[in-house]
Amino acid sequence: MKTLGERIRELREEKDLSVRELARHLEVSAPFLSDVELGRRHPSEEVLARVATNLDTTVEELKKHDSRAPVQELKRIVANDPKMGFALRQVVDEAVSAEDLLEFLRRRSKKP
């Protein structure tokens, strides 16, 4: 699976835009956009929305390629709910795949 930066670069190249051109449209610096494409930095929600608009895609599609773990948020949740920590540990220990976990959540959200 491509990283977020790789996907942005791929979409940018499909539109035949240079890093400088896209950066200008996004109102960010070319070095910043280059760092995003190389995985060194990550765009804010606002910049990600502008990327999606300029590259004719959706924020949701781009976020599928953002593999960063929300570490700080997970730490906060686990600190406040030990059961959540136990549940996450089971997911890790049992090597539950991302696909299986997402499928479980999809089925769960469809229940009345």
Image (cartoon, grey):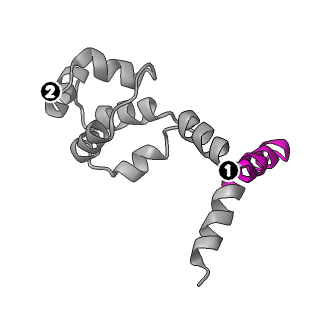
Judge from the rendering whether residue 37 lies leftward or rightward of residue 101; answer left or right.
left
- Residue that protrudes farthest toward the bottom in the picture: 112
Image quarter of residue 73: top right
Give the vertical position of 91 relative to 13 (above or below): below
Return the residue nearer the eye: 91 or 81: 81
Label placed on residue 92? none
- Residue that protrudes farthest toward the top in the picture: 31
Q: Position of residue 104 (x, y in %)?
A: 68, 65
- Residue that protrudes farthest toward the front in the picture: 80
How far apart, in angstroms, are the residues tagged by discs 1 and 2?
44 Å
Residue depicted at 21% across the width and 29% down the height? 22
Whether residue 33 is visible here, answered yes or no, is yes
Judge from the rendering whether residue 110 lies leftward or rightward of residue 26; answer left or right.
right
Question: Which amino acid, mark 2?
Answer: Arg
Label placed on residue 81? 1
Magenta extent: 82-99
Residue assigned mark 2: 24
Element at label 2: helix
Residue depicted at 70% across the width and 51% down the height? 84
Element at label 1: loop
Question: Which amino acid, mark 1?
Answer: Asp
Q: Position of residue 51 (x, y in %)?
A: 27, 39
The secondary structure making up most of the magenta span is: helix
Q: Position of residue 49 (x, y in %)?
A: 28, 45
Return the residue nearer the eye: 105 or 99: 105
Q: Position of residue 39 (x, y in %)?
A: 46, 23
Residue depicted at 31% across the width and 31% down the height? 13
Give the vertical position of 109 relative to 112 (above or below): above
**Of callouts 1 and 2, the N-terminal one:** 2
Q: How many marks?
A: 2
Whether residue 68 is visible here, answered yes or no, is no
Give the vertical position of 33 relative to 104 (above or below): above
